[in-house]
């Protein structure tokens, strides 16, 4: 036997080298993705958009920007696209950089091209930050619901977390001191019970408190019902309300969009986790002494991330749309700053005289959103092994 | 062969129940066994008799609920594992007791390289990282007989064959030099030639590393090849145990006899193979008395009502069938 064991390597290596496909998952993915022309088109537009937005950030900001989106030239208002600047009536500093208005000018004579550039950065950051927030919350909530879902919450858990929320609520309103006190008190209470449970596993509560041990509902029920409730809200109007109450700022909009769009990601992650949890490799990891958090984030998350990424790319598109919608209604980014939505909004009064004011940003939004959707669908097809056979 | 008599792990009257909506499944119903240092012990039984549940309980991997420990003790080096907190148990898993699973295809995480997976347990328990970790992984892969181990480290599971994956699983289990390895039917999913290789590997590793192995299988042919001692399990109870020679030479329980009779051997060539009538009872609806009596050719009225005791045949050979025991005593 020893002899054969020694022989094996040389004999098998050649064979195995010939037999095993030397393609990593990334290469495999790329081969599949490349076949989908629409997705490639989406990816290219996505990269162009990214580059434009980044360039826009640098070209339209600073003391003396290359393209000045705020430069008002009343004598040059509502010029059509590609119109030459009238050099006679303009101060040399007011002349647009290329001598022409690439996308025309608006009713104040501002260069629409410069404004579009500035707006593209807003769209990009809103899309990415909002989706980043929603994916983060989604993964966290979905992960807990999927992995710890079967854990039953007892009455005492609910009471304690209720107290804690009340503490936080006090803190943000007028009663700061009682809030902090309540918060610290509940934290101490939690630590104390956890310690007690570690010391004596079967410590009994006095009989009159036994109702605290009643199982109320599972973690999964709690999280998924919150998701259901959130989905029931007409989220655009929720966003409108919140934005109307908060000071108008781009960051508030990102956060609000993020906070109202995490439910899809939660459902995806939960569904993935429910099936992954029963997989042998998770049991194998547990058998090796890997802790729960490490199993969730290291072993299960990479396996569950594909559908989340797909929904995230599509989510970026809808976040861009939502921001444009908000800006159009006047609840978005405050006026001097241009976004694609408020360019359309400003232009709608002149839609028959100066259609470029609405059409150019409108079509830009259409193209970007479409490209994100196509890219997202291409991702999904290439990452989903069940759809692979079609190719 | 001489063994150290002090057991490494000793399971005493372990009971594991699963709570259904209408009934309780008594998957493991009072199992006692022990594994001594440097010993290869086989746990044999049909599908559904509680082997895997027993194995998982040794690592605290039974999910509670729906599972429930109905009683008993698992003493590992004198310490009852059932009393340990989850974080203490984590220090035992992989470090002192490791497990090799049945399906090498699904037991490896598809998104990590071999090195990541073997190295993980070492990182967690031994806090080794970087180049020493890599060397250790290569060494482990060589130990389990994977050719050109250094090249294989960056491979993903899907690039390996079934046998190689099972070798990687074994390397993962060996990573922290555990005292006990539980192998839960590690050859079931493999084809016959690879099975033989993996069995030989287990035997040589067990000798070389002086560790104990609890090998769970339904294949008596495997048992004869590798085990020092054998426990035969039926419907959540141990029905017979003894040294391998005892079990194969003079089995004393009708179930073991039936299993042996249904093995294909050269002398039975061309003849119809024996099969035990019926099937393993549903763990929720077990018969009263001896769990085997509905299928037993020797069953008498007494077997219906009385749960059989273990009868001692001497030299560590025990069987849970008083009928045959009495018969043997009467006939001398």
Image: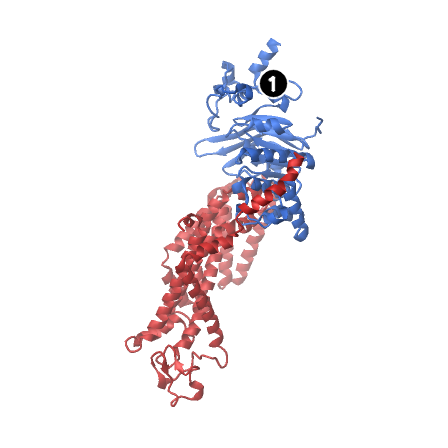
Instruction: Give the blue chain's letter.
Output: B
Q: Is residue A58 above or below residue B238?
A: below
**Measuring 65% from the left and 22% from the top, which residue is drawn there?**
B316
Residue B97 left/right relative to A321: right
Q: Quadrant of residue A288?
A: top right
Check the image and report above or below for B62 versus B311: below
**Residue highlighted by disc 1:** B250
In the visual, does B53 lie left or right of A368? Answer: right
- Residue B116 image offset from top left, x and y in percent: 59, 49
Position of residue B88 relative to residue A83, above or below, is: above
Rendering coords of residue B188 (x, y %)? 53, 34
Q: Is residue A51 visible?
A: yes
Residue B101 is drawn in which quadrant?
top right
Residue A253 in picture, x, y percent from top left: 43, 66
Foreground residue, B20 or B235? B235
Please rate how many residues cluster around mark 1, counting C-alpha atoms within 10 Å: few if below 14, some from 14 to 19, many from 20: few
Q: Secondary structure at mark 1?
A: loop
């Amino acid at each position: 036997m020893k002899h054969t064991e020694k022989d094996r390597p040389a004999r098998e290596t050649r064979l195995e080298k010939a037999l095993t496909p030397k393609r990593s998952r990334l290469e495999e993915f790329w081969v599949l993705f490349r076949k989908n022309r629409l997705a490639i088109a989406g990816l290219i537009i996505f990269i162009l958009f990214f580059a434009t937005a980044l360039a826009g950030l640098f070209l339209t900001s600073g003391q003396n920007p290359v393209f000045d989106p705020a430069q008002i030239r009343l004598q040059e208002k509502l010029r059509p696209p590609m119109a030459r600047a009238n050099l006679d009536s303009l101060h040399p500093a007011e002349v647009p950089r290329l001598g022409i208005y690439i996308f025309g000018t608006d009713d104040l004579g501002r260069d629409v091209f410069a404004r579009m550039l500035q707006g593209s950065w807003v769209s990009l950051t809103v899309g990415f930050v909002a989706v980043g927030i929603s994916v983060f919350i989604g993964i966290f909530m979905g992960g807990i619901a999927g992995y710890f879902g079967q854990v039953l919450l007892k009455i005492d858990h609910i009471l304690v977390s209720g107290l804690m929320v009340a503490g936080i609520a006090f803190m943000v309103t007028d009663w700061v001191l009682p809030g902090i006190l309540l918060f610290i008190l509940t934290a101490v209470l939690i630590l104390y019970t956890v310690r007690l449970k570690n010391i004596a596993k079967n410590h009994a509560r006095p009989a009159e408190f036994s109702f605290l041990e009643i199982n109320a509902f599972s973690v999964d029920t709690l999280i998924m019902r919150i998701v259901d409730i959130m989905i029931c809200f007409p989220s655009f109007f929720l966003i409108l309300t919140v934005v109307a109450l908060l000071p108008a700022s781009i960051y508030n909009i990102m956060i609000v969009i993020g906070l109202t769009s995490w439910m899809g990601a939660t459902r995806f992650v939960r569904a993935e986790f429910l099936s992954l949890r029963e997989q042998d490799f998770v049991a194998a990891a547990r058998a090796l002494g890997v802790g729960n958090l490490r199993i969730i984030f290291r072993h299960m998350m990479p396996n569950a991330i594909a559908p989340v990424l797909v929904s995230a790319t599509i989510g970026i598109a809808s976040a861009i749309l939502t921001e444009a919608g908000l800006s159009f209604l006047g609840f978005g980014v405050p006026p001097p700053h241009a976004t694609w939505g408020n360019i359309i909004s400003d232009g709608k009064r002149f839609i028959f005289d100066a259609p470029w004011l609405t059409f150019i940003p409108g079509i830009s939004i259409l193209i970007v959103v479409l490209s994100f959707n196509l890219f997202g669908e291409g991702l999904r097809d290439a990452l989903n092994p069940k759809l692979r056979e079609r190719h | 062969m001489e063994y150290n008599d002090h057991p490494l792990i000793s399971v005493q009257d372990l009971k594991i129940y699963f709570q259904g909506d209408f009934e309780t499944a008594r998957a493991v119903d009072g199992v006692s066994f022990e594994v001594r240092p440097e010993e290869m012990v086989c746990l044999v039984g049909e599908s559904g008799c509680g082997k895997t549940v027993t194995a998982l309980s040794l690592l605290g991997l039974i999910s509670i609920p729906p599972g429930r420990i109905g009683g008993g003790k698992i003493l590992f080096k004198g310490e009852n594992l059932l009393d340990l907190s989850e974080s203490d148990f984590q220090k035992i898993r992989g470090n002192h007791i490791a497990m090799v699973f049945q399906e090498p295809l699904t037991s490896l995480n598809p998104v990590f390289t071999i090195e990541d997976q073997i190295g993980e347990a070492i990182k967690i328990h031994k806090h080794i990282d970087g180049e020493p970790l890599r060397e250790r992984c290569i060494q482990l892969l060589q130990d389990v007989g994977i050719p050109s181990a250094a090249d294989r480290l960056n491979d993903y599971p899907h690039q390996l064959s079934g046998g190689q994956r099972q070798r990687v699983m074994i390397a993962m289990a060996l990573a922290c030099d555990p005292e006990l390895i539980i192998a839960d039917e590690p050859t079931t999913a493999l084809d016959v030639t690879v099975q033989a290789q993996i069995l030989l590997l287990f035997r040589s590793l067990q000798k070389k590393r002086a560790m104990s192995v609890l090998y769970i299988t339904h294949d008596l042919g495997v048992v004869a090849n590798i085990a020092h001692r054998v426990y035969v399990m039926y419907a959540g109870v141990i029905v017979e145990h003894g040294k391998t020679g005892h079990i194969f030479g003079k089995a004393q329980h009708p179930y073991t006899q039936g299993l042996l009779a249904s093995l294909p051997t050269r002398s039975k060539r061309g003849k119809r193979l024996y099969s035990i009538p019926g099937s393993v009872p549903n763990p929720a609806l077990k018969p009263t008395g001896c769990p085997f009596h509905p299928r037993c050719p020797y069953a008498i009225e007494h077997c219906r009502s009385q749960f059989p005791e273990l009868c001692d045949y001497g030299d560590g050979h025990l069987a849970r069938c008083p009928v045959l025991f009495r018969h043997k005593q009467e006939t001398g």
